[in-house]
């Protein structure tokens, strides 16, 4: 913790500004990687992020712990296999970052509660988005954590 604190003391910008700069760089590299051929696109994104992060740390613009945290967040966004599904989650990071920067942990909590309220009230195609969790449907609740295989349908002879 002491090494992180000493690294943060040398940083010229507040943490929120550093995270914004890194997030914009990561998003720019990700967009560039998507538009490149499939063989080199991901490589350019990862190598570019490493090179830019290392250069920013050596230049003293961004502290090393920020690079580590933003890199971990960027890599974890690849958990979602399809680009179009992960896009809203990546874009919601920016408003949450603003709320966290202005109001701290309370801002993050308010943002997460607002997202949860929105998801609870969302009903595409007339079905609540978080069914069966909200509203609770007891018969289908068993499939929330572990989905059992269906029994095969019997053929009538």
Image: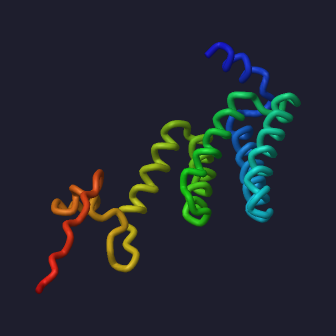
Q: Pick out the residue farthest to the front.
A: 157
Q: Nearer the viewer, residue 128 or 80?
A: 80
Residue at the spot 72% in from the left edge and 33% down from the top edge: 14
Tell me if residue 32 comes above or below residue 19 in the rendering: below
- The location of residue 31, given as percent across then percent down, is 74, 60
Residue at the spot 61% in from the left edge and 43% down from the top edge: 73
Q: Quadrant of the N terminus?
A: top right
Q: Pick out the residue farthest to the top.
A: 2
Residue at the spot 37% in from the left edge and 67% down from the top edge: 129
Direction from residue 128 to residue 99 in the image, left or right:
right
Tell me if residue 100 comes above or below residue 132 in the rendering: above
Q: Nearer the viewer, residue 146 or 96?
A: 146
Q: How many marks?
A: 0
Tell me the quarter of the picture where residue 33 sits.
bottom right
- The location of residue 100, given as percent across then percent down, is 57, 42
- The location of residue 4, given as percent across then percent down, is 67, 20
Q: Nearer the viewer, residue 51 or 13?
A: 51
Residue at the spot 39% in from the left edge and 58% down from the top edge: 117
Direction from residue 139 to residue 8 in the image, left or right:
right
- The location of residue 10, given as percent across then percent down, is 79, 22
Tell me the quarter of the picture where residue 32 sits.
bottom right
């Amino acid at each position: 913790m002491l090494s992180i604190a000493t690294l943060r003391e040398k940083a010229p910008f507040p943490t929120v500004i550093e995270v914004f700069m890194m997030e914009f760089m990561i998003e720019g590299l990700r967009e560039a990687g998507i538009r490149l051929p499939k063989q080199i696109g991901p490589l350019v994104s990862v190598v570019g992020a490493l090179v830019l992060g290392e250069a920013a740390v050596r230049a003293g613009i961004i502290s090393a712990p920020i690079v580590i945290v933003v890199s971990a967040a960027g890599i974890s966004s690849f958990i979602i296999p399809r680009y179009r599904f992960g896009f809203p989650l990546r874009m919601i990071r920016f408003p949450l970052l603003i709320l966290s920067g202005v109001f701290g942990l309370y801002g993050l909590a308010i943002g997460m509660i607002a997202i949860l309220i929105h998801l609870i009230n969302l009903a595409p195609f007339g079905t609540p988005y978080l069914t069966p969790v909200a509203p609770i449907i007891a018969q289908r609740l068993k499939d929330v954590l572990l989905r059992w295989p269906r029994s095969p349908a019997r053929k009538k002879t």
